[in-house]
Amino acid sequence: MTITTAKRIAARVPRLAPLAAALLVALPAQAQWNVTPSLTLGETYSDNPGLNSDANKRGQFITEVTPAIRVDGRNSRIQFHANARASSFNYSDSRPANARRSGVEYDAGGTVKVIDEFMYVDARANGGTRPVSAFGPDNTFNRYTDENQTKLSNWSISPYLVRRFGNFAAATLRYTHDSVNADETRFGSSESDGVSFNLASGRAWRDLGWNLRYARQEVANKRFGDSSSENALLGLSYRLQRTLSLTASAGYDVYDYGDFGGRTSGASWSAGFAWRPTVRTAIEMSVGRHFLGNTGSLLATHRSRHTVWRASYSDAVTSTRQEYTQGQQIDTAALLDSLFAVSIPDPVARRQAVLDYIQLAGLPATQGERVNYLTNRYFRQKLAQASVAYNMRQHGAVMTLFANERVALSSGAADSELLGNQLFSLNDNVRQFGASAAYSYRVNARTSANATLSTSRTRSLTTDIESDQQAVRLGLTRRFSRNLSGTAELRHLRGNRGFGSDYKENAISATLTALF
């Protein structure tokens, strides 16, 4: 299978050459680039850096060196951003069990306008460590532990064409090729090719709106063979009032799980409404049914001068690779971007302000990371998320909630190597709950105190195994000059592995970050 996949990749290279040439032509010579290298030096004392059991834990001083770079570019043809950092950890004694020596994380993405109002290209790449299982430690707050972690990277490139037919309709044709790779060899690294077509009504239809969508994706898994999905949907809307519209949809879905589950298919329908009473408030809601049972969806957003509120609910057939390529976590930067949109209209300056705020307040980049874990199976996922961000003079806060239920659709044989025979059914049916709150108090223009609390619970509905995780962090951040800042932090972590021993960690750390 590996040889076959390699041949497929090699066969695509000549076809992608014209696209690469077009991108080089499209890249402008006078783009506004902001390149910010940085270096962080840190010292931490942890009584359990590897998050081992109480019987095996051992205190350590840890020296950390982290060079990083942030790049932002934008003009009339290109939008680009990238963040990358590489950390090296040196322990005062021999490296403890389950602790790592280094770590690399990166995230980059952008859009190129190849031909104005006709051809565009989206591209994205990211990588870092991710949880192998939902029943064990993660490294959201402790970056040293290697237990329950694997290196995972993904990238995608997606050229698409846009065509407007006057005021009658607009069409989008998109091709996407992506790849997901993990160092955990029992998780099947894969590549996919997808095509989607969307045709939507234009202004000429006035109160009546419609859209037709068709999508097909083929996934080549290096260990578990091929799978595919095919989705067709017709959506309708009718505007009753200026702010209220009725919505309805009908579609047909086909999922082929390959050698690990066969094929499922069926029709779907939904009915609902879209209400936009002001430019700052929007609610879209629907109920319906698909071949797996009753379903529904919700997306509600509200923005005031000092707050941003968001609530969502989705019910879909998905997979671990799809969650990682599309991203289902609550993005802290995106949430704050909406909050700062009124006061900072320029997107580049706003992105810089958001990143500075996240650093000063000690906020995590994403929330709800525990929703995802490694599984080679397809599953039905019901996911509810809610978040609110608040910012006013000296006070700021970000709070999130999530509830998630996954029911496996394809055979557990695909996870037999990943989980082992004793935990064969662990990923059959999994339910997760979580909450986090981060509060920041700006003592003055250069100093900020912050506190973060988070908790989560994961339960296997098949085996009754449960795992709880809690974290508390207290920190102080000081900006000594425009290019130099420092932090001091206390943290306490505790949790259990569900099928093993408990763990606890207490740590104190200090870091110094210089921008160049």
Image (cartoon, rainbow, N blue to C red):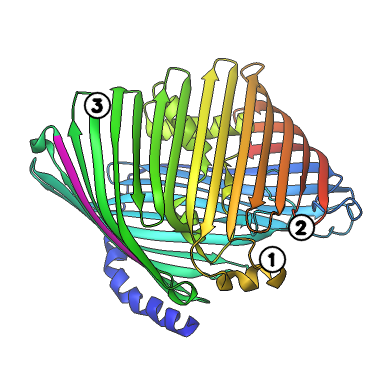
Q: Mark 2–mark 3 contact, CB under 8 Å?
A: no
Q: Which mark is residue 454?
A: none
Number of other residues with Cα within 10 Å of mark 2, as a class: few under 14, some 14 to 19, many 20 or more: few
**What residue is drawn where x is 29% and y is 60%?**
215
Q: Percent position (x, y) of residue 141?
A: 70, 43
Q: Earlier in the sequence, mark 2 or mark 3?
A: 3
The amino acid pointed to by label 2 is Phe
The amino acid pointed to by label 1 is Leu
Please state if 4 lies on the left or on the right of 93 as rendered.
Answer: left
Secondary structure mainly formed by the magenta segment:
strand
**What residue is drawn where x is 59% and y is 28%?**
482
Q: Is residue 414 above or below residue 353?
A: below
According to the picture, the residue beneath numbered tag 3 turns out to be 244
Q: Percent position (x, y) of residue 306?
A: 48, 18
Q: Is residue 109 above or below residue 353?
A: below
Q: Which mark is residue 499?
A: 2
The amino acid pointed to by label 3 is Leu
